[in-house]
Amino acid sequence: MNTNSHRDSADDDSIELPPEFIRALGRRREVTVTVPPAVESAILAAGKARMAAVRAKRRSRTAFRLLWPVAAAACFLLVWLVLTPPPPAAHASRQAYEKEKNAAAILLREFSALYPNQIRAIIQNDSGIQLELAENTNVKSGRPVLLKVCEPEGCEEIITFGGQSIEVAGHQVTVRTDAEGRVILDGDQLIWSSDLKRNPAPGIHIESHRL
């Protein structure tokens, strides 16, 4: 009984606000916020950084998914390189032959431009390149020839011409060529022919290539 009477008294004490006052309070809650340009730029920069981080994370996931196929391909290539047999010895020998011929042709062309009709021989060994020149410029040269002479002390390459007299393995010889492509070294103590493929003396090995 007392509770009801207290509630009735509380209801009687409540104040009813006028509608105009309530509308005024509603208008006061509507606040316009002005953001400075610096703050706006900072917000935009933070947003861009966030989006960049998201894109980078997506790219990293994509790269991780692609990593396994790439790794598998690399392993396959490595196994192929290991298991594939090397090129035949004849093919490797042919490549070395072409390389020697090209290098000799370059040397001959360059030195012939410096000493036209004067070169008797170009000798290349561990000491470097030596030129054997005639005293005059009316040397009659045949077809150029590349000789590779190997002795126990080492090897040297000699670029010369048919008809020239040169020193080979310590022996004075005359270089001769014929229409069949043979190269002949004719000397008093050393005779060699390219078609025989025979060592002229113990410990001496000679190869010839026509340029």
Image (spheres, rainbow, N blue to C red):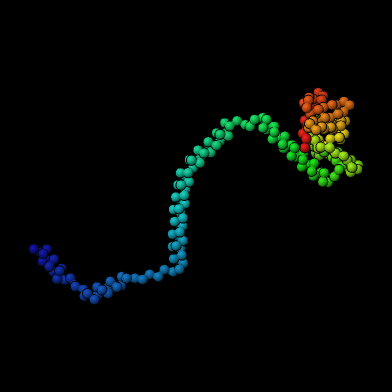
Residue 50: image location, x then y, percent: 44, 56
Quadrant location of residue 156? top right
Tell me if 64 is positioned left or right of 189 in this view.
left
Quadrant for the C terminus, please.
top right
Q: Residue at x 84, y 37 (%)?
A: 142
Residue 121: image location, x then y, percent: 84, 38
User: How many numbered marks are there?
Assistant: 0
In the displayed structure, would residue 196 be above or below residue 48?
A: above
Residue at the top extreme, as displayed? 202
Q: Which residue is drawn at 32% across and 70% down?
A: 30
Q: Which residue is drawn at 86% across and 35% down?
A: 164
Residue at the right extreme, as displayed? 135
Q: Is residue 103 visible?
A: yes
Quadrant location of residue 16? bottom left
Residue 106: image location, x then y, percent: 76, 42
In the displayed structure, would residue 70 be above or below residue 91?
A: below
Tell me if 181 is positioned left or right of 16 in this view.
right
Quadrant for the N terminus, please.
bottom left
Q: Can residue 171 be seen in this view?
A: no
Residue at the front extreme, as displayed? 179
Tell me if 100 is positioned left or right of 116 in this view.
left
Residue in the foreground of this view, choosing between 18 and 185: 185
Tell me if 87 is positioned left or right of 106 in this view.
left
Quadrant location of residue 26? bottom left
Residue 122: image location, x then y, percent: 82, 38
Q: Which residue is drawn at 91% across and 42% down?
A: 135
Residue in the foreground of this view, choosing between 78 and 59: 78
